[in-house]
């Protein structure tokens, strides 16, 4: 019984020293342009104009600040952007 306990503790000690291989950093699918980029501001302006064009009543939306931008490469021509 003492031998079994010694083997189990020894196995745990050896396994605790083992390390996993270093993870490779995968390239990001999302690109991060700056929030002050002219293309980002134009995309935000276009989106707001399209949203406001459909509004028949209520408030007209306006851009106050762009906090974050992510671009998604598209299969079809063009770029899809998430503006926050």
Image: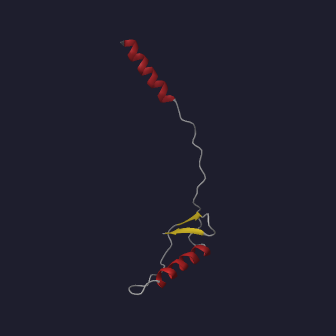
Residue nearest the viewer, comparing 67 with 78: 78
- Up/down of 8 relative to 28, above or below: above
> Looking at the image, which residue is at 59% across and 66% down?
33
Coloring scheme used: secondary structure
Residue nearest the viewer, comparing 56 with 1: 56
- Residue 6, position in %: x, y? 41, 16
- Residue 56, position in %: x, y? 42, 87
Q: Is residue 50 left or right of residue 33?
A: left
> Looking at the image, which residue is at 47% across and 78% down?
64
> Looking at the image, which residue is at 45% across and 20% down?
10
Q: How many marks?
A: 0
Residue nearest the viewer, comparing 79 with 20: 79
- Residue lying furthest front in this view? 76
Residue 57 placement: quadrant: bottom left
Q: Is residue 59 left or right of residue 50?
A: left
Residue 32 placement: quadrant: bottom right
- Residue lying furthest right in this view? 77
> Looking at the image, which residue is at 60% across and 44% down?
24
Q: Is residue 56 left or right of residue 46?
A: left
- Residue 52, position in %: x, y? 47, 83
């Amino acid at each position: 019984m003492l031998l079994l306990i010694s083997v189990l503790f020894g196995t745990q000690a050896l396994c605790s020293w083992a390390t996993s291989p270093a993870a490779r950093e995968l390239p990001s699918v999302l690109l991060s342009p700056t929030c002050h980029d002219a293309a980002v501001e134009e995309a935000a302006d276009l989106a707001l104009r399209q949203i406001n064009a459909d509004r028949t009543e209520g408030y007209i939306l306006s851009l106050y600040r762009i906090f974050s931008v992510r671009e998604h490469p598209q299969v079809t021509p063009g770029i899809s952007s998430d503006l926050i």
